[in-house]
Amino acid sequence: MTDTAISADNLSLTFQTNDGPVHALKDVSLDIDKGDFVSFIGPSGCGKTTFLRCMADLEQPTGGSITVNGVSAREARKSRAYGYVFQHAGLYPWRTIGRNIRLPLEIMGYSKADQNARIKRVLELVELDGFEKKFPWQLSGGMQQRASIARALAFDADILLMDEPFGALDEIVRDHLNEQLLKLWAKTEKTIAFVTHSIPEAVYLSTKIVVMSPRPGRISDVIENPLPADRPLDIRDTQAFLDVAHRVREGLRAGHSYD
């Protein structure tokens, strides 16, 4: 039996605002197995990022429940069960790339020797070895995002939560980083939850695609991706790829039919 990394059961979240309640998520139930690469796609404001933030204990559900590695999201956060990659790299401009990656390791109390070994390993994983002493402003946007991923990987969390990390990059850079991310996932065997607005990106990267409806965010379809694990970029020209992309589009259209 496959172990479950993340499990949501009738998860709901309502924000109270001056204009009245905002129903961000409603009755969301989903299991993500360990080692899965799950993409979340849907229109802006459908609750994709909110769902990710609930996994990370950055938002508190107002209904239902969510567990991460079999414990509450809060316990998982305290045990450092996940690394989080935001939409923007969020690197400190006054710290070198190496020192940006070092920061969470310093906070967590790793020894200097362990810090150095981990920094070296994750820079090699994201193909940034040799850039440890560069400052963020000396790197391209894509390289900064790779450094951000390295920082999230540095303390060996089992789960990687990624909130549209490549959305601001041009298509050529995005394609390259998609390829690198798949290689990284294959090497590390981590569980990845990935938010995107791009249908091709979701289909190319994922073992499972979760299609969400407009607010209040609900799941309109969960698509098990039949594509092989080995995915060169030109797989996107195949009929199998186009068939999955078509089903995602159908799921997005169906999501608009909710009352």
Image: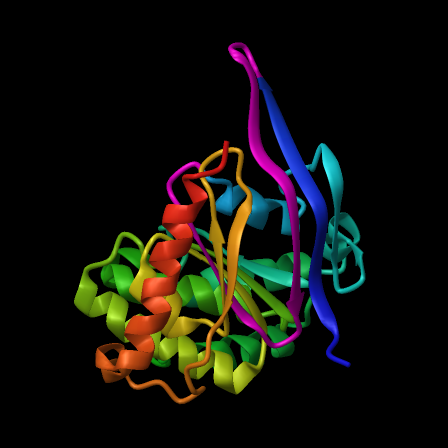
Q: Nearer the viewer, residue 142 or 129?
A: 142
Quadrant of the image for the N terminus?
A: bottom right
**Residue 124 falls left or right of residue 160:** left
The outermost residue toward the top is 18
**Residue 234 falls left or right of residue 53:** left
Compared to 128, does 66 lie above or below?
A: above
Residue 204 image position (x, y, % from top left)? 36, 73
The colour scheme is rainbow
Residue under the image location 23 percent in, 62 percent down: 140
Residue 225 image position (x, y, % from top left)? 46, 74
| The stretch drawn in magenta includes residue 39 | yes
| Res 106 visible | yes
Residue 213 image position (x, y, % from top left)? 47, 43
Q: Nearer the viewer, residue 40 or 72?
A: 40
Compared to 236, does 245 lie above or below?
A: above
**Residue 238 falls left or right of residue 107:** left
Q: Quadrant of residue 14?
A: top right
Type of secondary structure dominating the magenta stretch: strand
Residue 154 image position (x, y, % from top left)? 56, 70
| Res 92 visible | no
| The stretch drawn in magenta includes residue 5 | no
Total of numbered circles in the picture? 0
Residue under the image location 47 percent in, 69 percent down: 150
Residue under the image location 71 percent in, 32 percent down: 62
Q: Quadrant of residue 69?
A: bottom right
The span shown in magenta is 17-45
